[in-house]
């Protein structure tokens, strides 16, 4: 399906059904991440339950330690 | 006046009144690596009246690609970054006060370091130090501007005690070992952009302009920019900014006596209590066992059992060539006892 990820239209594989799947796909599942779907932050406990749909606007920011 | 700050005073959100606030402000910069160098230079030029810069490390050749305050000579002479930064900043602006602190930040010393400052700029290279600073900043009610970068990516976020969720609300646990280390390299545009955001936030705080709880990230190489409003992450039970705070990182001294430095194949060892070593004596003592002994006013460096070692006056040592804490501890005990 197609979603807007960080402002860009991207095609993601159909097996990605949840926020958790998306994080795994981008290898961010072990990172500290803040995810927003359609202008609302998704709390961690909802990562597996919140389904993604065609056209969703997703913002994803991961924290890094470098400086 | 010589008009030194005229362009800043002409900028309406700052003005003459704002410039006066800038000159009366005290900013602490935690870390004098890439982000610290960039922020410190901007803030010194902007006329921040007092800058405290803290760092535990010394200048190396691999720093020069992006750590703008340092020269080849600083690397050759292994000058502690906080000192080298101070020397350069004084050349840039002789009308302000620069305090340099060559030290390792931990839960027991951070509160004294930041006390009395207007803003704290994050320029650390690890999550643990950041959470220590976050606890102290929230406890003392000092705005703390998080910033970090790796590769061509960077992000910033302002912790304004009492107004925005703190860093602990956003990062509710330390990442697993190995995930904290950014070994992917970094390009200076990512550093400069991150620092530019942080300094903008710092100037806003000082001049009384408001800041929102927004996490901003960007990827310079891919031309991406993202921002997320963090309000919803405010945790009422946060151990730092919640209603009954315990400030866990201000009690964590023991946790960080040894630290594996990110991507550096280096272990840092800090003695349990503060020491004041005579570097001359140490070097005499090492004469038989070590090679290439070099003593500077701040540190002694040498090769011992095939490891390059740097020992600071306060008893802290950097053992290069290993990521193994027990190997490093063994070496340390043989050197300093
Ligand atoms: Zn908090």
Image (spheres, coloured by chain):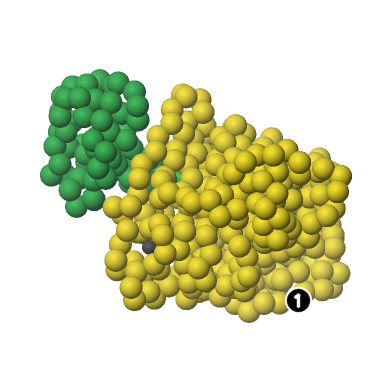
Chain colours: A green, B yellow
- Residue at 16% from the left image edge and 25% from the top image edge: A54
Q: Residue at x 43, y 31 (%)?
A: B225
Exactly how many numbered labels are in the figure? 1
Assign a secondary structure to mark 1.
loop
Q: Disc 1 marks which residue?
A: B276
Q: Is residue B112 visible?
A: yes
Most extreme residue toward the bottom, as rendered? B273
Residue A53 at what x, y percent from top left?
15, 29
Q: Nearer the viewer, residue B275 or B196?
A: B196
Point out residue B242 in the picture as x, y percentages from the top left corner. Answer: 34, 69
Seen at 52% across and 34% down, the residue is: B151
Choose between B316 and B231: the one closer to the eye: B231
The answer to whether residue B285 shows anywhere in this view is no
Q: Quadrant of residue A16?
A: top left
Query: Which quarter of the figure has residue B298?
Result: bottom right
Q: Chain of mark 1?
A: B
Q: Quadrant of ligand 1?
A: bottom left
Q: Quadrant of the C terminus of chain B?
A: bottom right
How crowded is the residue under tag 1: few (<14 C-alpha within 10 Å), some, or many (20+)?
few
Q: Would you say A43 lies left or right of B63 here?
A: left
Q: In the picture provided, is B206 more to the left or to the right than B304?
A: left
| Residue B33 position within the rendered picture, expressed as x and y whole percent measured from the top left | 65, 48
Q: Nearer the viewer, residue B135 or B11?
A: B11
């Amino acid at each position: 399906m197609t979603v807007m990820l960080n402002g860009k239209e991207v095609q993601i594989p159909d097996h990605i059904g949840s926020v958790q799947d998306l994080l795994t796909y981008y290898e961010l599942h072990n990172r500290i991440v803040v995810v927003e779907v359609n202008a609302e932050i998704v709390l961690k406990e909802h990562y597996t339950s919140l389904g993604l749909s065609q056209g969703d606007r997703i913002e994803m920011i991961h924290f890094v330690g470098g400086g | 006046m010589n008009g030194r700050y005229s362009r800043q005073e002409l900028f309406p959100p700052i003005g003459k009144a704002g410039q006066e606030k800038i000159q009366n402000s005290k900013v602490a910069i935690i870390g004098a690596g890439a982000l610290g160098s960039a922020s410190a230079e901007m803030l010194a030029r902007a006329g921040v009246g007092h800058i405290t810069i803290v760092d535990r490390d010394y200048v190396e050749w691999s720093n020069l690609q992006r750590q703008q305050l340092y020269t080849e000579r600083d690397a050759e002479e292994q000058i502690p970054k906080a000192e080298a930064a101070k020397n350069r900043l004084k050349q840039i602006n002789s009308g302000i006060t620069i305090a340099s602190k060559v030290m390792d930040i931990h839960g027991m010393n951070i509160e004294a370091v930041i006390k009395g400052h207007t803003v704290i700029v994050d320029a650390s290279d690890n999550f643990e130090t950041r959470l220590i600073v976050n606890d102290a900043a929230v406890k003392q009610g000092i705005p703390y501007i998080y910033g970090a970068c790796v590769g061509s990516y960077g992000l910033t976020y302002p912790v304004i005690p009492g107004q925005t969720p703190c860093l602990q609300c956003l990062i509710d646990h330390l990442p697993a070992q190995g995930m904290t280390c950014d070994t992917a390299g970094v390009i200076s545009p990512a550093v400069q952009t991150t620092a530019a955001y942080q300094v903008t936030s710092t100037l806003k705080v000082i001049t009384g302009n408001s800041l929102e709880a927004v996490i901003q990230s960007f990827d310079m190489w891919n031309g991406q920019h993202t921002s997320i409003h963090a309000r919803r992450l405010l945790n009422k039970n946060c151990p730092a900014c919640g209603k009954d705070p315990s400030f866990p990182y201000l009690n964590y001294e023991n946790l960080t006596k040894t630290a594996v430095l990110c991507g550096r194949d280096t272990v840092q060892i800090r003695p349990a209590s503060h020491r004041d070593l005579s570097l001359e004596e140490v070097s005499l003592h090492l004469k038989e066992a070590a090679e290439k002994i070099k003593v500077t006013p701040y540190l002694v460096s040498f090769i011992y059992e095939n490891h390059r070692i740097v020992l600071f006056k306060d008893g802290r040592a950097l053992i290069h060539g290993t990521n193994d804490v027990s190997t490093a501890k063994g070496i340390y005990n043989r050197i300093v006892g």
